[in-house]
Amino acid sequence: MELRVVEHPLVAHKLTLLRHRDTPSVVFRQLVEELVTLLAYEGTREVRVEACTIQTPVAETTGVSLQRPRPLVVPILRAGLGMLEGMMKLVPTAEVGFVGMARNEETLQPVTYAERLPKDLSGRQCHVLDPMLATGGSLGGTVKFLTERGADHITCICLLAAPEGIEHFRSLVDELDVPTTLVVAAVDERLDERGYIVPGLGDAGDRLYGLAE
């Protein structure tokens, strides 16, 4: 597993605003969209392309187009949905699937409750979206789910990650023998006793969409 921490002034600035507890949901959502687009630029460096011939207003030339099958973007519900628009702005022709995976707050283990994905992902590059890599269980479970369906290259994009989550995630995906890249805006200090990232930014889903009791 390759870890990429995107060090850029605009990434750091937008992340600082996201962390602030007084940032309202409407602003938080806009910042997430902008930040994900910046992270997606780094996360799509290995996207597969092929040569194509086009006609410019002046002459014929050779360029590149995205290979088929097209990349598959997979937000993890519900918080990953807040990252989808930022990703699709960069790769508008990508296809989208969904995985619903929640963390049991007592065991801290992931529980899958929904999925909408192609049955056969052979030859597909997948981009998984999840704001917070805390314990690493949900993200690792999703990557395993995708590889079991044939995905052969996976990039995960997260806003924040905890060191404990990175190591757990690494141990899970390294067993799968599928090229996996983790792109994050920052690696924070640690997890607290509840499994939340410190200093973090709180519950990303709640800050994006409010409480859903």
Image (cartoon, rainbow, N blue to C red):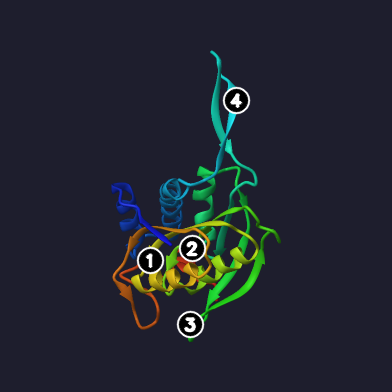
C-alpha distance separating marks 1 and 4: 41 Å
Viewer-proximal residue among 13 and 111 = 111
Query: Quick one: label 1 or label 4, which is nearer the N terminus?
Result: 4
Viewer-proximal residue among 77 and 25 = 77
Q: Which residue is mark 1?
A: 161
Viewer-proximal residue among 83 and 164 = 164
Tell me the amino acid under the disc marked 4: Thr
Disc number placed over residue 105 in the picture, else none? 3
Disc number placed over residue 53 in the picture, else none? 4
Q: What secondary structure is found at the residue carrying circle 2?
A: loop
Tell me the amino acid under the disc marked 3: Glu
C-alpha distance separating marks 1 and 3: 18 Å
Please provide percent x and percent y for residue 130. 49, 63
C-alpha distance separating marks 3 and 4: 53 Å
Disc number placed over residue 130 in the picture, else none? 2
Q: Residue furthest right?
A: 119
Query: Quick one: label 2 or label 3, which is nearer the N terminus?
Result: 3
Asked where in the image residue 190 lies, by quadrant, the reply is bottom left
